[in-house]
Amino acid sequence: MGGCFSKPKPVELKIEVVLPEKERGKDELSASGKGSPRAYQGNGTARHFHTEERLPAPHSYPGPQDCVEAAVCHVKDLENGQMREVELGWGKVLLVKDNGEFHALGHKCPHYGAPLVKGVLSRGRVRCPWHGACFNISTGDLEDFPGLDSLHKFQVKIEKEKVYVRASKQALQLQRRTKVMAKCISPSAGHSGSTNVLIVGAGAAGLVCAETLRQEGFSDRIVLCTLDRHLPYDRPKLSKSLDAQPEQLALRPKEFFRAYGIEVLTEAQVVTVDVRNKKVVFKDGFKLEYSKLLLAPGSSPKTLSCKGKEVENVFTIRTPEDANRVVRLARGRNAVVVGAGFLGMEVAAYLTEKAHSVSVVELEETPFRKFLGERVGRALLKMFENNRVKFYMQTEVSELRAQEGKLKEVVLKSSKVVRADVCVVGIGAVPATGFLRQSGIGLDSRGFIPVNKMMQTNIPGVFAAGDAVTFPLAWRNNRKVNIPHWQMAHAQGRVAAQNMLAQEAEISTVPYLWTAMFGKSLRYAGYGEGFDDVIIQGDLEELKFVAFYTKGDEVIAVASMNYDPIVSKVAEVLASGRAIRKREVETGDMSWLTGKGS
């Protein structure tokens, strides 16, 4: 049930600030979608799956014996705008009271299992406290990312002042709901040299585009091609848990792609795009015609250009194989990480428990300085130093020295020599768009693909999404930006699919990202490029703080550690279209944010 709701006023954010338990970080890292799906061993030659008719069991309506129903509370137990986790025999349910109505939903975020009761309720949706995914409280549907699945919605009835919830036992245990999708009914699927939609790149943008098309009832052929050997996987996890195996990282099992007729070509490299004849050519000569095209090629890591760059055991981390090899080589040995950005610092943190020594080389004077500012950067530096990581700042690598072809030493411009058995390079990335240079598809001077708010390129029928695009960021005056983050790629893939189906959707999501090091998470929302001041509340030393990034009079981004759900709250305020003024965060009075007080 649950019925309709009228939208509350945008900025009523009624919520209690819940400070996290110690366990949070561990939980977040280990959560890999339970029941690990098997990876697809692609071999480049046997390219196509045949679409089998075997579908996952449809959502059958549960019979009375499969259901559990119970009174979970008194109607007066919850105020408007309150959420509570309630027990229901076989599991827990999130009970929400909004505008006088009760709603019951799955209680865990399907992305990494965060408890949604600690999230933020606003404008008819609940936002996850960890990574910012949003779910509609009337339907349970996923409305903002990351993650692919929605929540189950359960029946609620009120009798004699008591609130009853009825749910199927299966739904209570599953904690996630995959939206109903169309199957592919195109007779040519799997055989011919033409497809209806071709998606180049199988990261978050490519996968979400394919899934959205099927969710919206599109039943023609979809081909997703990737340079990788694997089906789409959770790439942000690579640098956070380098031991993870491909099957633990898979975003969907092999059977899913079969069931919904999403063909995946692995180890498939596109070399040319012919937009006049709507055709792409692959490296092995295979040609494929399309009617709609999504370009989501992502980026290529920058490599070192110094002397000795060809020695063995120097890696950029792009695949599970790269990550696994780094861990194997680092065990009990000396590891050097070049670059103190997100990837480098995550890798350095992970290797501290495995390697004999971990050193980080960075050009800036503090890690994350451009992104998080001097003070937060220094606090994180201290956390790393307390974990035995050695930093060589304001210098770069001048030479990699080998012994019998394998890395032995890293020589710095400061003439320092650092012992190294393995080296990980995390010095940024460039858009992987070289194959588009002669295509007529517009690229900017840095190689990014400019798109409009509908993710359209300069060529009709050709869309682009993910790390390789620049797009207008609605709440920063449509400034053209590149945001190479996981959540944004999901959102752009969805908008591209909607516009392939002529639904006129526009990208409007507030950027949200996170990093995890030593079991601690840092969350970030907004777009902080060009900030001129940082206002910090809480305790930097204790790593329990919130940092507001301002430009002129306006808050343009926020970062926090151990201060949930503040980042999700700020994201909700920004998503509602309200600007946050610098003076509001300077006082330390957070009542403007929690909806309490003036």
Image (spheres, helix red, strand yellow):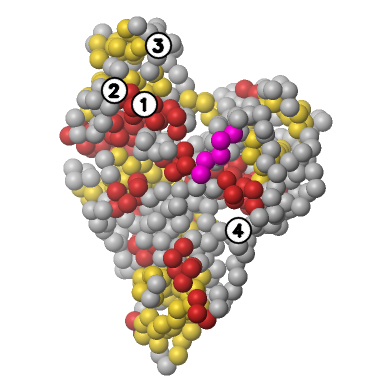
Residue position for label 1: 326
Lateral position of residue 531 relative to residue 361, left or right: right
Label 1 CA crowd tier, 10 Å (few <14, some 14–19, many 20+): many
The residue type indicated by label 1 comes to Val
Residue 314 is situated, as x and y percent measured from the top left of the image, at 39, 18
Determine which of the numbered discs, if any, sits on residue 335 in the image.
2
For the residues marked 2 and 4, what is the alpha-carbon distance in whole angstroms?
Answer: 45 Å
| Circle 4 or circle 1, nearest the eye | 4
| Circle 3 or circle 4, nearest the eye | 4
Label 3 CA crowd tier, 10 Å (few <14, some 14–19, many 20+): some
The residue type indicated by label 2 comes to Ala
Residue extent of the magenta highlight: 38-42
Residue 40 on the magenta span: yes
Determine which of the numbered discs, if any, sits on residue 259 in the image.
none
Residue drawn at x 64%, y 39% as measured from the top left: 264
Q: Which comes sooner in the sequence, label 3 or label 2? A: 3
Closer to us: 376 or 223:
223
Quarter occupied by the C terminus: bottom left
Residue position for label 3: 311
Determine which of the numbered discs, if any, sits on residue 56 in the image.
4
Residue 63 on the magenta span: no
Residue 381 is situated, as x and y percent measured from the top left of the image, at 24, 33
For the residues marked 3 and 1, what is the alpha-carbon distance in whole angstroms?
Answer: 15 Å
Residue 588 is situated, as x and y percent measured from the top left of the image, at 26, 55
Is residue 510 something one can see in this rendering?
no
Q: Is residue 11 above or below residue 526?
A: below
Residue drawn at x 29%, y 48% as measured from the top left: 26
Q: Mark 2 and mark 1 in contact (Cβ < 8 Å)?
A: yes
Lateral position of residue 45 relative to residue 96, left or right: right
Residue drawn at x 57%, y 46% as measured from the top left: 254
Q: Which comes sooner in the sequence, label 3 or label 4? A: 4
